[in-house]
Amino acid sequence: MEIRAASTSLAALGHATRLAIFRLLVQAGAEGVNAGLICDKLKLAPATLSFHLAHLSRVGLIRGRQDGRFIFYAADYAAMDALLAFLTDNCCQGAQCLPKTAATAAPPKRRRTAAARQSRQRSE
């Protein structure tokens, strides 16, 4: 990731509403959530949400997919990974990182979603 792309991503996340949306989508997982649920959870007007989703999409932090009459949004984990890698490149000059950084460097495995469990059960 180059510095201009990192700067653009960080600027987008520098707005409290966009950061809240991005965090919600990161927590939602790869399946994402529909725009209506985001509105409900964050108590946003549809037009406000649309504006912020468009901005996050434009900088490449999220992606949307049409499913019938609904649009589901999900965090782009590859873009998030690239941004985190850029920010932590040469972190701590080769020494052990600060405690919070070290603790988040290897997060515990995520719980499987209900859909993933059902899919796995069907294949067995």
Image (spheres, helix red, strand yellow):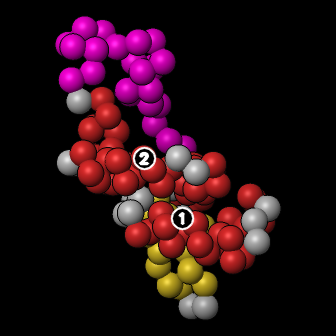
Q: Position of residue 33 (x, y in %)?
A: 60, 67
What residue is shown at x 49% (from left), y 67% (from top)?
Answer: 55
Question: Is 34 in the magenta?
Answer: no
The amino acid type of the residue labelled 2 equals Leu
Q: Is residue 68 left or right of residue 63?
A: right
Q: Magenta segment, which residues?
A: 90-113
Taking depth in this image into account, of 71 and 19 the one nearest to the observer is: 19
What residue is shown at x 40% (from left), y 69% (from top)?
Answer: 58
Taking depth in this image into account, of 76 and 59 the one nearest to the observer is: 59
Q: Which disc is residue 10 wearing?
A: 2
The answer to whether one can see residue 119 in this image is no
Q: Position of residue 51 (x, y in %)?
A: 59, 72
The amino acid type of the residue labelled 1 equals Gly
Measured in 3D between alpha carbons, the distance from the residue under mark 1 to the one under mark 2, in whole angstroms, is: 21 Å
Residue with the most extreme top position? 95
Query: What is the quadrant of the C terminus in the image?
Result: bottom left
Q: Which disc is residue 83 wearing?
A: none
Q: Which disc is residue 32 wearing?
A: 1
Q: Upstream in the sequence, badge 1 or badge 2? A: 2
- Whether residues under marks 1 and 2 lie with C-beta atoms below 8 angstroms apart, the answer is no
